[in-house]
Amino acid sequence: MDFKLTDIVSINDFSRADIDLVLEKAAEMEKLPVSKKNTVLANKTVASVFFEPSTRTRLSFETAIQNLGGQVVGFADAEVSSTKKGESLSDSIRILAGYADMIVMRHSIEGAARRAAEVSDKPIINGGDGANQHPTQTLLDLYTIKKAFGKISGLNIGLLGDLKYGRTVHSLMYALKKYGNVNVYCIAPDSLKMPAEIIEDVKGKINVKETSKLEEFLPEIDVLYATRIQKERFVDEFEYEQIKNVFILGKEILENTKKGFKIMHPLPRVNEIKPELDETDAALYFEQAKNGLPVREALLSILKDVKKG
Ligand code: CP
């Protein structure tokens, strides 16, 4: 297998072939009953350490580890770890690398996963580092888009909401660059625009248009990727309160969309998507969350034999 990565830290580290390999493996995993894959991680232990809250990422990884026959150790709250006593991230990761064969982690600090990968002699999988990246979410997002549309290139993709702090949309932009021939509409209020350096980075590979008005490009969009306003990243709570309900999607948007139009969201949602959309054909977000399981099974099975130099 031609997969050179020893850690999953940033989607930028992936080649297009690496991404395609994970997506192909995920499709295989999705078809296999647990009884046909429950020895893949036999005698392997995976540490799952979440210094920030999570439902989907942590529990889909932990379910994936169990489906593959591995053991899980870890914590869901840094308050119950020795971080509370002042232990550094580097020390914690070195210790965990002595116990486990792989480490899945989420941390509030941008760059935490990269630092962990430097000090760990076992593979690190980044389950989100601050407002920086969420590469495994991106892999499941790409898997979901490909399943729904049969392709990624050639699509018109709208990114909506908090594009400044939303790590999922940052990673997705870098991934779409690897596919090319994608029109991306970045739809955000001025204070939550996609960082200029990301737009600069993808320039020439994908076409990016920016607006603060959803209606401006809505009729052209194939898939609208909505995001939560990231309350936890705001320094000023008043600023969050002012902007928190900037986009609320309801059934009325479907009057002005293309045939086959889909809505995605990494979840959790707060007010961004009204429940009235949940039972419509446009709602892809629950399926998207479910796809996290085969994609994470695929990643774990690919990384299980990695030896770091
Ligand atoms: N999409 C996502 O990362 O969800 P969690 O925060 O629940 O893991």
Image (spheres, grey):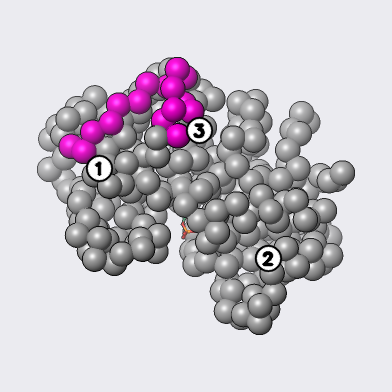
Q: Earlier in the sequence, mark 2 or mark 3?
A: 2
Over which residues does the magenta segment extend? 197-213
Residue located beneath label 2 in the image: 89
What element does badge 3 sit on? Answer: helix
- Is there a contact, CB below 8 Å, between mark 1 and mark 3? no
Give the residue drawn at x 53%, y 61%: 108
Query: Which residue in the structure is indicated by mark 3?
Result: 174
Left or right position of 24 against 99? left
Count neighbours of disc 3 (C-alpha within 10 A) and say few if under 14, some if 14 to 19, many if 20 or more: many
Where is residue 16 shown, x and y percent of the image?
60, 26
Residue 254: x percent and y percent?
Answer: 17, 38
Q: Is residue 52 above or below residue 154?
A: below
Q: Secondary structure at mark 2?
A: helix
Residue position marked by numbered label 1 in the rendering: 190
Q: CA distance from mark 2 to mark 1?
A: 35 Å
Judged by depth in the image, the label closer to the viewer, 1 or 3, is 1
